[in-house]
Image (cartoon, coloured by chain):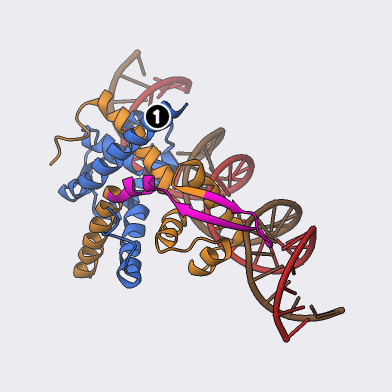
Chain colours: A orange, B blue, C brown, D red
DNA sequence: GTTAGTAGTATACAAAAGGTTAGTACTAAC
DNA sequence: GTTAGTACTAACCTTTTGTATACTACTAAC
């Protein structure tokens, strides 16, 4: 169980950097919620905002920009009247599934543990 | 690839809460670094602080308290002169290994991808 | 002409996280 | 008696993150 990380200092530092990168990309209060909203099929700005309880336009705008930068989201401007913008999740976002699965399982387990201790 | 999450809204919200819990516990700038330092065998406060480049006593103290609260760390006061305090990682911290493995693999992959795109 | 919808941006503010510096109280070595 | 080491804590400051409210500019419906 413990052979895989934390043993060799050099390898470990490289690994920690990778972990930090990953946490940076999916960290924060809203990133994962936005990804989930997009996966659920919401594509337009106001649509996404309404589907995520409590997010402000300013924050959603910033999150979408970051997600686009990281290759998770594609922004598409459709020249109509009025101009419509569609946000779509890319297949690259699927590469997060292992992380999300591990986080989900651990989170559930930890929650159960805390509950059983009370 | 996408069947596992993001399909059913109810399940999905429960899953998101678990993910948020997990991110909360291991998130932040220092948590994982402290865990790694403890795994490397550092047990004393100043020792740990010296092993983590750039962390202040104030922040280390806060991180250790949180880690203790979450069951990752055991604090032991040894009544000598001078009083010595030892911090030890608990077996529970090993339950994070799946998360760390997934984060590490993804972080490495993402970094390589960004590098190859430049 | 008012309202509502399109997709945001601007400004200001609040809260949280983290950093800096100094200091506590004790002991042991020089 | 000064310095250094033990393990911290307090006060204050800065940066980051998130919130609230208002506003742009355009169109279409009522």
- Report which quarter residue B2 is drawn in: bottom left
**Crowd band around label 1 with a 10 angstrom C-alpha radius: few (<14), some (14–19), many (20+):** few
At x 19%, y 69%, the residue is: A116
Q: Position of residue A56 (x, y in %)?
A: 58, 62
At x 60%, y 60%, the residue is: A57
Chain containing the residue with disc 1: B
Left or right, B38 with respect to C9, comes to: left
Please tell me whether residue D27 is drawn above or below residue A85 in the rendered image: below
Q: Position of residue A106 (x, y in %)?
A: 24, 56
Q: Position of residue A84 (x, y in %)?
A: 61, 59
Whether residue A60 is visible here, answered yes or no, is yes
- Report which quarter residue D15 is drawn in: top right
Q: Camera-side residue: B41 or A66?
A: A66
Q: Which residue is mark 1?
A: B53
Left or right, C16 with respect to D20, comes to: left
Whether residue B28 is visible here, answered yes or no, is no
At x 26%, y 64%, the residue is: A111
Q: Camera-side residue: B44 or B113?
A: B113
Please tell me whether residue C15 is drawn above or below residue A24 in the rendered image: below
Q: Camera-side residue: A107 or A66?
A: A66
Q: Camera-side residue: B90 or B116?
A: B116
Please tell me whether residue C30 is drawn above or below residue B111 in the rendered image: above
Q: Secondary structure at mark 1?
A: loop
Q: Position of residue B116 (x, y in %)?
A: 41, 26
- Magenta residues span A75-97
Q: Is residue A12 magenta?
A: no
């Amino acid at each position: 169980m413990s052979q895989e990380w934390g043993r060799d200092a050099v390898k470990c530092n490289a690994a920690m950097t990778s972990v930090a990168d990953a946490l940076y990309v999916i960290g924060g209060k809203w990133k994962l919620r936005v990804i989930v909203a997009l996966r659920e099929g919401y594509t337009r700005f106001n649509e996404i905002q309404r589907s995520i309880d409590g997010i402000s336009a300013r924050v959603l705008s910033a999150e979408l920009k970051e997600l686009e930068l990281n290759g998770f989201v594609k922004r598409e401007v459709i020249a109509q009247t009025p101009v419509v913008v569609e946000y779509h999740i890319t297949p690259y976002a699927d590469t997060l599934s292992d992380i999300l699965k591990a986080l989900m399982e651990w989170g559930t387990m930890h929650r159960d543990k805390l509950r059983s201790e009370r």
